[in-house]
Amino acid sequence: MLRTHTCGELRLSDANKHVTLAGWVQRTRDKGSVLWIDLRDRYGITQLIFEEGKSPAELVAKGRTLGREFVVQVEGVVTERLSKNDKIATGDIELKVTAITVLNAAKLPPFTIEDDTDGGDELRMKYRYLDLRRNPVRESLQLRHKMAQQTRTYLDAQNFIEVETPVLIKSTPEGARDFVVPSRVHHGEFYALPQSPQTFKQLLMVSGFDRYYQIVKCFRDEDLRADRQPEFTQIDCEMAFITQEDILNMFEGLVRHLFKNVKGIELPSVPRMKYDEAMQRYGSDKPDTRFGMEFVEITELTKGKNFPVFESAELVVGINATGCSEYTRKQIDELTEFVKRPQVGAKGLVYVQYRTDGTIKSSVDKFYTPEELGAWTAKFNAKPGDLLLIMAGETFTTRKQLNELRLLMGDKLGLRDKQKFSALWVMDFPLLEWNEEAKRYHAMHHPFTSPKPEDIKLLDTAPGDVRANAYDMVINGTEVGGGSIRIHDRATQQMMFSHLGFSEEEAKKQFGFLMEAFEFGAPPHGGIAFGFDRLCSIFGGADSIRDFIAFPKNNAGRDVMIDTPSTISDEQLKELALITKK
Ligand code: ASP
């Protein structure tokens, strides 16, 4: 090997040892009589020292020629440092260099390779291999590695078998568009890249594998949105002969195992909340439960006082921003502007300030007496010093809008600490979701999800009310995983497809293989998939998933390093029968 030790390894106890290190030149400090160089590798940094008069002159001269990011091998003697650096593990020592070999020179990097870099996003993406040299990015990938290892440890101990499923498949409807791959051999025919291994894992249950998992790439051609990756990784799992309860316990176990073994955190047992309740209390099917600020409905208290907005509203609901009663006019205007942005889409915001002096002031003083407003503050359990923020309108929309405001206030009040973790199961999702554009129902999870048996009778009369045996795991307001108990008989699956608007023929063409498999002894089964990139970013306390992916795409879906998507030659196009001319 080109080294005896790594750059993160040497300590005071190694003093006087003659060692060889190899790594990259991070930084040089030249004081004239002394020259210091920080040598970096994956494991850390070791300080090298060259002293005018004490080190051979040609060695000092050579040290001076080393540029940033040169790859060098150095020999030297470990010595105690005069001024120690307690910020790094090797900070008690330095290496008195006795020989240097330049293994490779380097061009000046386009940005500084340190924890805080001057490189913008796009530049860092273009030179991702250099960005990956930086500690924070490297550490994120090391965390990911640990997460994957611990996932395998847990699932293996629970008798799960990791099975690879194909990447060239036929489309699986998970609600997004497929990426397709033209077949050269079969002109005019296409493979699709899997949006998930859903049908394959179900077939593995029919095969008797019983407990399957896979850490697997999935592909969805969705509209671009910040922080969405066209290819991403799931921890994909399926189990047979289980009830929903078994799945919840098994995967709560996985998440708690990860917290314990990756972060050293004992996560308390994960509470459960029904979808309807989550919507009512938080206006979201993925509530951030790190903080309270729950919704309080005051519809009844507001009626009959001639305030037109509330008179016509189906729901009047608000939150209590504790300690915010003294917000200035400007601050409140900013909140109103926030909810009026097209992304939120509310018409306005009503506020009630329960001032610290005990008086009540609101934006609807004209319509409500202080006593009436007092009844509101009582319903909110508000104290002097609190600020009520109230919205009104159609129930579902108003809840969604208030959810945005709740999250904003959570941020403003510092209630969304990234090092604090709160997990939640959200259950009993609606089976179907009305799609206004297509004017028909879509499967909210996917078409293989089983309706709650007691709700099946509603499928014809009130499809929107049918609940599914489906569940999501939510951590800190982010959906990190979701799954369901599956349909496992042909008749129900066929019925489901027909409710989703598939003709019998279409269903057979697309999913005949699965329905046929159900006729050959399919066991009851169900599963879940976790978004692995997202899970890693939450564990890492980061907002973006990008740094938890070694080579991510940018927000426009491009890999700017290898410069793709890109055109292909006419030759290739012809071979694939995508053009016919020439
Ligand atoms: N295939 C589903 C998904 O990717 C997860 C599941 O139902 O297991 O969301």
Image: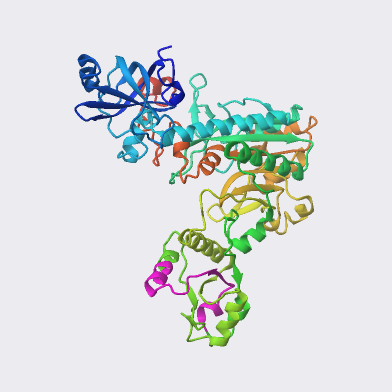
Count of numbered circles in the view: 0
State left or right for residue 82 relative to residue 342.
Answer: left
Asked if residue 499 shows in the view, the reply is yes
Q: Which residue is more in the foreground, 386 or 48?
A: 48
**Residue lying at 47% horizontally and 74% vertically, measured from the top left:** 325
Query: Could you tell me residue 116's position as x and y percent?
Result: 35, 40
Indicate the quadrant where residue 235 lies. top right
Asked if one can make out residue 170 in the rendered structure from this viewpoint, the answer is: no
Picture quarter with the N terminus = top left
- Answer left or right for 236 relative to 78: right
Give the left or right position of residue 14, taking residue 460 as reference.
left
- Quadrant where the C terminus lies? top left
- Give the x, y percent position of residue 564: 38, 30
Q: Quadrant of residue 513?
A: top right
476 shown above or below 144: below
Compared to residue 343, the image places residue 104 above or below, namely above
Which residue sits at x=24%, y=18%?
54
Where is residue 468 shown, x and y percent of the image? Answer: 70, 50
Please check the rendered image and state whether residue 570 is part of the magenta-colored stretch, yes or no: no
Q: Position of residue 442 (x, y in %)?
A: 61, 49
| Residue range highlighted in magenta | 307-336
Residue 326 within the segment the image draws in magenta: yes
